[in-house]
Image (cartoon, grey):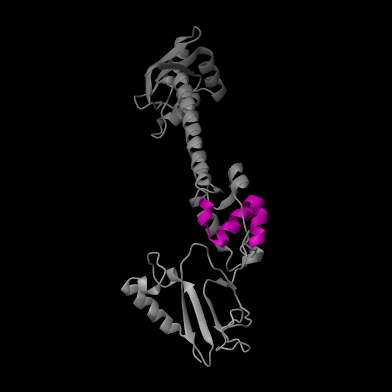
Amino acid sequence: MEIKNIEIAYLNECTSIQKDIVDTYWKIDNSLEFQQKPLQVKNQFNLEQSELTKIIQTYSILTYDIVCSTCDKLSGNKATSQSDFKQSIGRYKHRYFSYKCNACEEEEIKALALKKKEEQKALVQKYEDAINEHRWMDLSPFLSELLHNCLSTDFKALKKEYWSKLGQSNFKKLFRGLYDLAALNLIFLVRNDWSDRIEDYQYLPRLKEEFKYFSPTAPAMESTQVNDTNKLQFRLTSNPISNPISNHPDSPEYAGGVTFKNKIVLEANTEYTFALWKRTGRDLYLTMISTADIAPTPKQVSLSNHPISLQEGIQDFFESIAPQE
């Protein structure tokens, strides 16, 4: 801080002794320290405190200019006592403070307000980005449920619920979860300035609208349990009323009933490979499976027309699944 033009202004005509008292009282050195304290002045001139105060306030004030640290403009000031002067300049003598004129202070306040507004806008955008990116999609079941509960209740009720749910030994898991959600910018933690403890949390209203929570214990929507297969295999029993010597066209050589334990799905426009094995008597055993499940292949009809490597693969497959008597 820089001070210029320190002067004593005499308010009224005074006697020479009164002027000596005033000059002695206001005498100041280059370090802005008064050379005589009021008690010393009072003793030097054999005055009561009330008499000294009356003389100083009646006949004088101290005028001085403070230089603005920003624009170098001079600001006129005055003091009616030593304590008044010390109090006025005291905080500006500290190295962390500097004097600014009223105009510069107003500009600084406006600049700080604008900076705060921009920082707030950037902060909100971070939380908007988190919503736009659906960052809750990769949350663990615990964090997903915690986020749901944060959006559904206040911090006091949340702590009470998780104290009951987690117990004292695992209660810290709640706060670790809150820190994890805050790191993803899904919630904002309000912390104590001194202890840094979490006091509350906040979130954008839009998050509550877009976040959908599905309990892991609830059945998935539009899902059904399907136990099916694309492999067909069963035994073909000979027709007991059929005469193999007969050439009657309406008499089937194999006939019977079969019950499948699982649903069998045969897709249209899908190639299937089949095989027949002779069993006891005249019975046969049929197996049919999607060729793609054995090995990828170009579209063929007969096993003999498949590439040799695939023929061998199919043959090996059927040998491995050949039914036992």
Query: Residue at (51%, 80%) from the top-left corner?
Result: 286
Q: Is residue 297 above or below residue 232?
A: above
Res 158 quadrant in image? bottom right
Left or right relative to 48: residue 298: left
Q: Position of residue 271 (x, y in %)?
A: 46, 67
> Which residue is painted at 53% across and 17% down in the image?
57
Quarter the N terminus occupies: top left
User: Which x, y percent locates residue 239?
Assistant: 60, 86
Q: Main secondary structure of the magenta part?
A: helix
Q: Is residue 299 above or below residue 289?
A: above
Please name whichever residue, 306 or 166, is drawn nearer the observer in this view of the structure: 306
Residue 43 makes an appearance in the image: no
Q: Is residue 296 above or below residue 9?
A: below
Give the residue displayed 48% in from the left and 17% down from the top: 78
Residue furthest out toward the left: 308
Label count reads: 0
- Residue interval drawn in magenta: 135-162
How far from the left and from the top, in percent, is residue 168?
61, 67
Tell me what residue is drawn at x 43 percent, y 29 percent.
Answer: 92
Left or right: residue 298 compared with residue 124: left
Reply yes or no: does residue 53 show up in magenta. Answer: no
Residue nearest the observer in this picture, 68 or 284: 284
Q: Quadrant of residue 6?
A: top left
